[in-house]
Amino acid sequence: ETGVTQSPTHLIKTRGQQVTLRCSSQSGHNTVSWYQQALGQGPQFIFQYYREEENGRGNFPPRFSGLQFPNYSSELNVNALELDDSALYLCASSTPRGLAVHEQFFGPGTRLTVL
Amino acid sequence: AQSVTQLGSHVSVSEGALVLLRCNYSSSVPPYLFWYVQYPNQGLQLLLKYTTGATLVKGINGFEAEFKKSETSFHLTKPSAHMSDAAEYFCAVTGATNNDMRFGAGTRLTVKP
């Protein structure tokens, strides 16, 4: 069984640029959640995708957007990068909502540095 | 709205001593509570979870936690610390829809030889 994978592992961008981060969910999981973890802080919920539709969003501006594909992999896009966007971005997959609450399985993250 | 507060950003114990990491939650709906561990430069690994039923939950690596509704707490314990337990620990809460998991700020556990 393949776990959650994320790419790239590290990324350096400059202010104003755009970035795309990718996530492949664990086999059998059709729900993907994205989190931002700033240095020394806990993960902050960005949004969740279920069956290719956004299913919940945290307190992040519209320049944070996402996609989920038919194979349940997902992308996080961030436009007009700001210095405060520097963080570890975590992707987590889980089993379908509506069933018993299952844990979210996390990938290793993508470390984004904005200069 | 849901939130968690982890008391103590750093906890230091000696090897073999009791580990106690504190978590208090706030939730307007029945909470589902989780403890995750994060090692340097890695993602989060689930230690244990409480959804319904038994309030004392046992997890991996000898950790356990007790859900106390009256105290809105979900503290994590381990009877005897091991050097390999040194890591960052996060408490998290979500509701039945599981689409908005809220994490605490984390507690860094140091284990002294």
Image (cartoon, grey):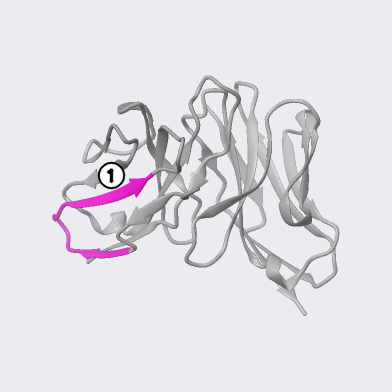
Span of residues in magenta: A10-24
Chain of the residue that carries numbered disc 1 in the rendered image:
A
Q: How crowded is mark 1: few (under 14 residues within 10 Å), some or many (20 or more)?
A: many
- Name the main secondary structure of what is drawn in magenta: strand
Q: Out of A111 and A51, give the one closest to the viewer.
A: A51
Indicate left or right for A91 with B48 as reference.
left
Indicate the amino acid at tag 1: Leu
Q: Position of residue B11 (x, y in %)?
A: 70, 64
The furthest residue to the front: A1
B9 versus B112 height, above or below? above
**Among the 4 quarters of the image, the one containing residue B16:** bottom right
Numbered circles on residues, count:
1
Q: Position of residue B45 (x, y in %)?
A: 58, 52
Q: Residue at 61% x, 27% y: name it.
A: B27
Q: If the image is split into quadrants, where does the C terminus of chain B sit?
A: bottom right
Q: Out of B50 and B21, give the one closest to the viewer.
A: B50
B104 versus B94 height, above or below? below
Q: Residue at 72% x, 49% y: name it.
A: B22
Instruction: Name the residue tied to disc 1.
Output: A76
Q: Residue at 53% x, 53% y: name it.
A: B44
- Check if residue A13 falls in the magenta segment: yes
Q: Position of residue A105 (x, y in %)?
A: 51, 45
- Check if residue A82 falls in the magenta segment: no
Q: Position of residue B30 (x, y in %)?
A: 65, 22
The secondary structure type at the circle numbered 1 is strand
The furthest residue to the bottom: B113
Indicate left or right for A75 with B6 as reference.
left
